[in-house]
Image (tube, helix red, strand yellow):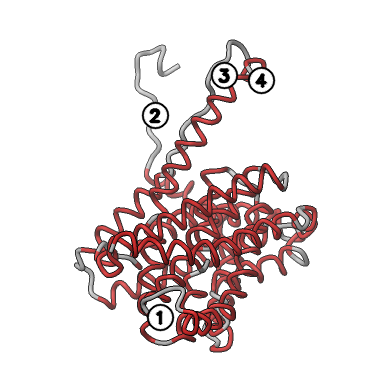
Amino acid sequence: MHKALGCPPPRTSGPKLFGLFLTKLAALLPGLLLSGGLAAVGMALGRIAWLQDHGFSALTLAIVLGMLVGNTVYPRFAATCGMGVNFSKQHLLRLGVVLYGLRLTVQDIGHVGIAGVVVDALVLGSTFALACFIGTRWLGLDRKTAMLIGAGSAICGAAAVMATEPVVKARAEQVTVAVATVVVFGTLAIFLYPVLFELNRHWALMPGGATAFGIYAGSTIHEVAQVVAAAQSVGPEAANSAVIAKMVRVMMLAPFLMLLSAWLARDDARQARATPEAGGGKGEAKGRLTVPWFAFGFVAVVLFNSLQWLPVSGVDAVTAIDTALLATAMAALGLSTHIGAVRKAGVKPLLLALMLFGWLVIGGAAINHWVPALLG
């Protein structure tokens, strides 16, 4: 009627908007509180020295707690908490990935040099490519699960799996399976790498001592917490270089997501042209580029942090908030995961992760040996 009379539509008043906001918040609050409460417990457990020494981070513990509750009492409250849980694993996750950039600076690249950057890039690219090839061609896994396991193994564990999920549009159980493989083999790496260091001292397969071995650990172990735990067992020199190499590898998350999104869009378009009946007509290319905007935010935060405008106390405070956001997203993911769906995935995801772990240990050692030699 307003359009017919040439009048503008009535605007929503301030009080009405505030009322809508309160209604939305009330719907989200139960799920947010449940996910946040589990995250808080996971973060508290993550401060226990024994768990820290064995590489169990707050994120890992949060998803385990979420799965325990999600497969026991949560179904009784799912109708009330579902909206807030979904909000946590989608929107809080993206914000958490953006703020993750405060852990990094551009200056980190200078500490490992061009050889360290090339090592990280080769390990990342080769591991993800192997995951896609072995997972889909040899093991018959669906592409999304293979990609998630590949991203977690190639970049930074659970955080990379969670960041890749919106790009590949995976289901909760696929994400959980991928995270589980990171936990299993990342934990194994904590105990294996100190042994490898001692073997390298005798055989001298990788020159450079503890510093070079730290770069090897940082470029091949899954989680940041697992890198720290493994490298600290070797010594402070190894720990310092391992963390820097790992941070440079984490920095590659943003360009990885952008390239993956472009590749998936192109692949979908090609498949649509090849099967016009599936596209609904004349072979329209329905592949659409899913731009991971949060990846651009991640890069912006890294660049901002490189300027060192924030005091150390401010960075520490925001980093703590970021850990809470990511832990909340992980807890929400655990709440949404059904054990039956994970069990249905079978042993193939674990077998893929085992093969990738073998590549990271052996192939990663070869890359760490030859790249510095070639680049001088």
Q: Residue furthest front?
A: 203
Q: Secondary structure at mark 2?
A: loop
Q: Amino acid at mark 4?
A: Ala
Residue of label 4: 278
Q: Amino acid at mark 1?
A: Ala
The earlier-in-sequence mark between 2 and 4 is 2
Q: CA distance from mark 1 to mark 4?
A: 52 Å
Picture quadrant where residue 122 is located:
bottom left
The earlier-in-sequence mark between 4 and 3 is 3
Q: The C terminus is located in which quarter?
A: bottom left
Q: CA distance from mark 3 to mark 2?
A: 46 Å
Q: Secondary structure at mark 3?
A: helix
Q: Secondary structure at mark 4?
A: helix
Label 4 environment density (alpha carbons within 10 Å; few <14, some 14–19, many ≥20)? few
Residue of label 3: 273
Q: 355 or 106: nearer the eye?
A: 355
What residue is shown at x 72% (from left), y 69% (from top)? 68
Q: Position of residue 102 (x, y in %)?
A: 33, 65
Q: CA distance from mark 4 to mark 3?
A: 9 Å
Residue of label 1: 239
Q: CA distance from mark 2 to mark 1?
A: 62 Å
Q: Amino acid at mark 2?
A: Pro
Q: Nearer the viewer, mark 2 or mark 1?
A: 1
